[in-house]
Image (tube, rainbow, N blue to C red):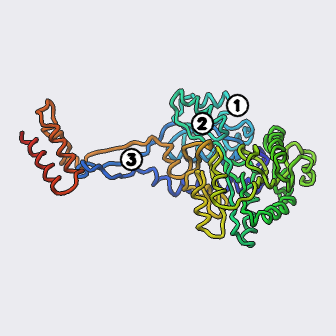
Amino acid sequence: PRAPGKTLTDAVFGEILVTCEKLKWLAENAEQILAPEPRAPGTTVIFTKKVRVEYPPLGVIGAIVPWNYPFHNVLNPTSAALTAGNAIIIKVSEYASWSTRYIGQGLKQCLAAVGAPLDLIQFIYGYADTGAALVSSGVEKLIFVGSPQVGAKVMETASKTLTPVVLELGGKDPFVICDDILPAELERIVQVSLRGVFQSMGQNCAGPERFYVGNKIYDSFCTKVAQVANKLIVGASNLEPAKIDCGAITMGTVSIERLQALVDDAVDKGAKVLCGGSMQTLEKHLSPSSKQQKGSFYPPTILAHVPDTARIAKEEIFGPIMCIFTPFDSDDQVIQRINDCPFALSSCAFAQDPKRARDLANRLDAGMSSVNDLEGTTYLSQSLPFGGLKESGFDRFAGPEGLRGLCALRSVCEDKFPKFLRTAIPSPMQYPSKGMSHIFAQGIVELFYGFGLRSKVHALSNIIKAATA
């Protein structure tokens, strides 16, 4: 966890566990998913042809990945690309270059152990110009994980060489809690919500950034999450691994100033601070061994009664801030508020009545939804594709869709009985024209697609007339 400064728990839970699940799913399912897939032949050739889809590799995949999960963000595209038969070139964030050196050495050892070429995996390091060079280098497909602003530039550069791209551009995932929730269930949801916000200090592409709570339970929820958040310990996990709840802000002062500006704007517009909210409150959260590293941390923060007009309602937080918007009175009202957002990556909805939660989740603008659980559970099921809508990007990785997306899909049609029956052009359709080809073609269309016995008889009459002319 050293490069991003996350806790050991966050590293094991968010990096190792999901990577193991990815590798296990690929090992158990990839061969079947990538095997030639028989399809139903068309009506006119059903008796003579067999058809299939094949999934050969594309060639070389490019990937530009961020710093927030330096281990998983490398293993995720690498494992999928190699499983599909490709090589891969990965441009890692300049904030994760140090740890990637060690990860790269481990991957090279894996390649050597199975006798694979060591250059199947290549790492490149640098800034924006390095990423632009990779996009325009001639890779067969590019995977980009980052901000919408940079994603637009990647897409523009890729368009010059018609390079297909997968864009995963972050989100502002909604977390909806209906007011039919019972007290015992609310206790569970409080812990689920806190894990979602403070896992890796909120530096997650898919993580809850917008909390919408029903009016009747609003105050109770706010009180309970604030009570826990005010007890959280912040610091360097490698110094006191057993005692640290929250790790570092990876980009230091740059991120801290951005987060503070979002909090200040929300407070100016009426939001209430229930925990944290400024660097002045950091001291009470810091572990003793981290007192000299204040520039790397931001206090766990909870804002309540946040208005929909605040900047934090539309801009990605990517930090340890629970943002609880003003309460809602009806499902229709909250759906309208939630969907008025440029992002649509993931989502979750909670209700005592599972049907209500499911119906709410189905109406949210999102590429992924979880019912009565944290939206990250969709990613723990690697059989599901990962990706979003709107400014959260397009195309998918993970699941059969993501794995097949790393292939050069090929449609194949061949004779069903090649030794005995091969398709020939019927005599009326052969060149030069005998003047009856259109009558024959009309008969074929009517025979296969017409309705009723009379239509079929008329079709056969035209076919015979054209064939004997």
Identity, as a three-letter code, of the amino acid under mark 1: Gly
Circle 2 Cα neighbour tier, 10 Å, few/some/many (<14 / 14–19 / ≥20): many
Q: Quadrant of the C terminus?
A: top left
Q: Residue at x 89, y 45 (%)?
A: 294
Quarter residue 123 falls in: top right
Identity, as a three-letter code, of the amino acid under mark 2: Ile
Name the residue beneath numbered marker 1: 126
First in sequence, mark 3 or 1: give its number: 3
Q: Give the side of residue 257 with respect to residue 192, left or right.
A: right
Label 3 SS:
strand
User: Above or below — where is 201 with respect to 92?
Assistant: below
Inter-mark Cα distance, 3 to 2? 27 Å
Camera-nearest residue between 220 and 404: 220
Label 2 SS:
strand
Name the residue beneath numbered marker 2: 89
Q: Residue at x 87, y 42 (%)?
A: 295
Quarter residue 351 falls in: bottom right
Residue 119 visible somewhere in the drawing: no
Residues tagged 3 and 1 counted as in contact (Cβ below 8 A): no
Circle 1 Cα neighbour tier, 10 Å, few/some/many (<14 / 14–19 / ≥20): few
Identity, as a three-letter code, of the amino acid under mark 3: Val
Find residue 242 and report its horizontal and vertical position in percent.
83, 59
Q: Residue at x 54, y 56 (%)?
A: 383
Find residue 439 and report its horizontal and vertical position in percent.
15, 40
Find residue 209 and report its horizontal and vertical position in percent.
72, 51
Inter-mark Cα distance, 1 to 2? 13 Å
Name the residue beneath numbered marker 3: 53
Camera-nearest residue between 83 and 350: 350
